Image (cartoon, helix red, strand yellow):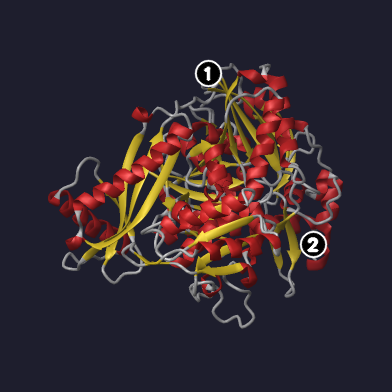
């Protein structure tokens, strides 16, 4: 039984292969931005040749991708229109009147009006009141007239429909979709009652508009990928990683592609959490540094932190997602000098094309990878297992552009680039830990991505973290994470009511409605309903607050006693979160939520190889590496990870090479291979486990 996980990154596309639930092999190929599917096909062929399996043997094919995110970042989605309740056409433009830069008089607009200019935002005569009753019936003739105008004059491919209080009664939105599909079946339609049936008009409209904007292009991408897989005789249904860290079928994603917006980083967090548990650490901070960006996330008690209200760029992204903090800090991040003469790194990236200068693919700007090569951390003949030969002479030439402008030597310039990018990543780790009330010193750092193990040791020193973990296949851990994620679906609905006014029968009716919605998604995914795990929760707040806390709700029938317990839990969680609570203040429910999860069998990493190698056997030679003051140049031993004997400690500085990454053990650090096959790095004097 073959299972294949494929994760497309900005520079590389990663593949992890399982046979009978054991990690068999992994490969990296260069991403192909002009046609992402070309890189996928090349990787499948390569891993098939290595592992020697027939494509028809693939039983699961799981995909993580940034294609939806890139559409928003590059602003190249569908031409779309928006239908709103008459009088609310400008909700998208008004937004919340928030400014991300308070004192900037020339700030760019803070709402996503690029999705749909004013001329394609049209009001429809209809009205549902706050209780869900019809005040004004839908004007169906106006719907068809304005849809015709949107299609014929403005050539829209998609339409977002967001009527007032449709989360209370969706009848008008549903009928509008029927009218649009009857007249123009080729138009993609997104309804707010299906995408985000939660109150707060601006956020609901944003989510619905994002969904419509990316729906045609995401749909074409998935259809093209499915067609290519069929040509290769891969009959397994295509599964996709969602922003929440759960997977689902491509059919579900085509209907609601907005759940794909943060698909890319989620697999890495799931894989990092799994690797941490194998090495005995349930509290970890995952750091995934690839060629273009760095994703940081916190895992507490083995569970990644989830967010319900994040951002995509600067716009509200109201969806359940793994809480990942992303910055433009990767191997391809470009070093540059600002107008004040200061050295900066990123967020611009050389990406896969043309890539760093040392790739010899036409890149001209100095990057972090060029600096790593100049410092001696990377082997020019064994990068990506030797698939990419690096040119150190060209890397030096690139870094000289910086050194000459700063009037310093090349090594100092290269080390300065590292210091700055490391500082940027340390700040991101502080944002996901200290800013949320967690002490990073109590967490282990899981390092992965092609560049994570190069830089992680330096971050340990900056943050006072005593332990770092480098899993067996860190360069493809995001792809491996796809193979261990559960199949999940989430549903929610607004239920805005004071606790004293709650009708338990109505609450139970909403929970059953949400559960039925998730069960339908599970049926599409071909999952046996009787084996699905269910959890319930509610967003709650003190009356008068404008923010909520998610409180677990017990399964089974609710009663007055269980409602009292839920309120008591709210007070306790409020105190833990904000440092205070007031049991005398009235509490209200805001939204009800259901999560359905189907756990898949947990695969096993290959585990430690019991081989009779010594440290001398594992050593490949020496290389001069530069570690800055006070160490300067150090004659650094180079080791082959495959031959490292378990339990034997190495003193830094040391370089450990493998096919998908390089691990740098800095001076005053030690490392060893543990029973799970992971490299454990300790700061000298750090607490041993």
Query: Does the rendering let one see residue 661?
Result: no
Q: CA distance from mark 1 to mark 2?
A: 51 Å
| Local SS, label 1 | loop
Where does label 1 land, which residue?
20
Q: Is residue 44 visible?
A: yes
The front one of 203 and 62 is: 203
Front residue (pair 586, 212): 212
Binning the other alpha carbons within 10 Å of mark 2 as few (below 14), some (14 to 19) or many (20 upward) gives many
Q: Residues within 10 Å of mark 1 (few under 14, many from 20)?
A: few
- Image point (45%, 35%), residue name: 486
Query: In this rendering, which labeled residue sits more in front, label 1 or label 2?
Result: 1
Q: Nearer the viewer, residue 263 or 438?
A: 263
Give the vertical position of 180 relative to 546 (above or below).
above
Indicate which disc residue 407 carries: none
Whichever of labels 1 and 2 marks the residue nearer the N terminus, that label is 1
In terms of image quadrants, where is residue 408? bottom right
Q: Position of residue 257 (x, y in %)?
A: 56, 48
Farthest left residue in view: 561
Pointers 1 and 2 in contact (C-beta within 8 Å): no
The residue depicted at 25 percent of the width and 41 percent of the height is 555
Q: Which residue is tagged 2?
A: 402
Q: Quadrant of the N terminus?
A: top right
Left or right relative to 75: residue 459? left
Residue 124, given in percent of the width and then of the height, sits at 51, 68
């Amino acid at each position: 039984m073959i299972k294949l996980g494929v994760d497309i990154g900005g520079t590389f596309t990663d593949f992890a292969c399982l046979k009978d639930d054991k990690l068999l092999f992994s490969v990296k190929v260069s991403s192909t931005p002009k046609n992402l599917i070309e890189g996928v096909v090349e990787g499948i062929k390569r891993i098939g040749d290595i592992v020697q399996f027939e494509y028809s043997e693939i039983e699961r094919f799981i995909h993580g991708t940034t294609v939806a995110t890139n559409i928003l970042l590059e602003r190249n989605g569908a031409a779309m229109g928006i239908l709103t309740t008459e009088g609310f056409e400008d909700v998208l433009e008004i937004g919340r009147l928030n400014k991300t830069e308070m004192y900037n008089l020339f700030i760019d607009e803070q709402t996503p009006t690029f999705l749909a200019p004013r001329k394609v935002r049209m009001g429809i005569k209809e009205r549902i009141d706050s209780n869900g009753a019809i005040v004004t019936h839908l004007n169906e003739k106006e719907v068809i007239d304005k849809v015709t105008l949107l299609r014929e004059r403005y050539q829209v491919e998609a339409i977002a429909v967001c009527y007032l209080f449709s989360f209370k009664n969706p009848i008008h939105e549903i009928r509008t979709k029927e009218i649009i599909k009857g007249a123009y079946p080729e138009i993609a339609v997104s309804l707010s009652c299906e995408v985000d049936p939660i109150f707060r008009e601006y956020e609901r409209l944003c989510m619905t508009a994002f969904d419509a904007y990316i729906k045609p292009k995401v749909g074409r991408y998935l259809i093209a990928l499915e067609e290519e897989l069929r040509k290769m005789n891969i009959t397994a249904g295509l599964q996709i990683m969602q922003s929440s860290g759960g997977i689902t079928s491509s059919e579900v994603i085509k209907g609601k592609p907005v759940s794909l917006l943060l698909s890319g980083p989620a697999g890495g967090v799931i894989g990092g959490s799994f690797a941490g548990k194998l090495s005995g650490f349930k509290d970890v901070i995952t750091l995934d540094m690839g060629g273009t960006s760095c994703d940081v996330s916190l895992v507490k008690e083995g569970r990644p932190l989830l967010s319900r209200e994040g951002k995509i760029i600067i716009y509200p992204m109201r969806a359940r997602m793994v809480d990942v903090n992303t910055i433009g800090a990767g191997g391809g991040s470009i070093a540059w000098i600002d107008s004040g003469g200061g050295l900066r790194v990123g967020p611009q990236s050389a990406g896969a094309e043309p890539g760093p200068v040392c790739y010899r693919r036409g890149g001209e700007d100095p990057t972090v990878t060029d600096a790593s090569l100049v410092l001696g951390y990377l082997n020019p003949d064994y990068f990506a297992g030797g698939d990419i030969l690096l040119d150190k002479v060209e890397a030096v030439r690139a870094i000289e552009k910086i050194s000459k402008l700063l009037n310093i030597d090349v090594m100092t310039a290269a080390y300065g680039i590292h210091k700055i990018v490391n500082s940027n990543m340390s700040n991101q780790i502080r944002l996901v830990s200290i800013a949320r009330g967690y002490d990073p010193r109590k967490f282990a750092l899981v390092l992965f991505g092609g560049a994570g193990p190069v830089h992680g040791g330096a971050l340990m020193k900056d943050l006072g973290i005593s332990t770092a973990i480098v899993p067996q296949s860190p360069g493809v851990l995001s792809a491996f994470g796809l193979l261990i994620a559960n199949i999940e679906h989430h549903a929610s609905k607004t239920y805005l009511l004071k606790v004293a006014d709650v009708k338990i029968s109505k609450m139970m009716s909403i929970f059953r409605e949400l559960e039925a919605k998730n069960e339908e998604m599970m049926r599409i995914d071909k999952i046996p309903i009787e084996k699905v795990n269910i959890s319930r929760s509610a967003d709650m707040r003190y009356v008068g607050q404008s923010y909520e806390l998610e409180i677990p709700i017990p399964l089974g029938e609710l009663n007055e006693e269980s409602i009292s317990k839920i309120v008591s839990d709210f007070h306790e969680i409020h105190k833990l979160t904000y440092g205070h609570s007031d049991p005398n203040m009235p509490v209200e429910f805001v939204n009800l939520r259901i999560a359905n999860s189907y756990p898949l069998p947990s695969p096993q990493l290959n585990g430690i190889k019991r081989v009779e190698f010594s440290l001398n056997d594992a050593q490949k030679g020496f290389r001069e590496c530069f570690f800055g003051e006070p160490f300067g140049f150090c004659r650094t031993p180079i080791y082959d990870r495959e031959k490292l004997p378990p339990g034997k400690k190495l003193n830094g500085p040391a370089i450990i090479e493998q096919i998908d990454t390089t691990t740098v053990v800095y001076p005053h650090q030690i490392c060893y291979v543990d029973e799970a096959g992971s490299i454990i790095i300790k700061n000298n004097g750090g607490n041993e486990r």
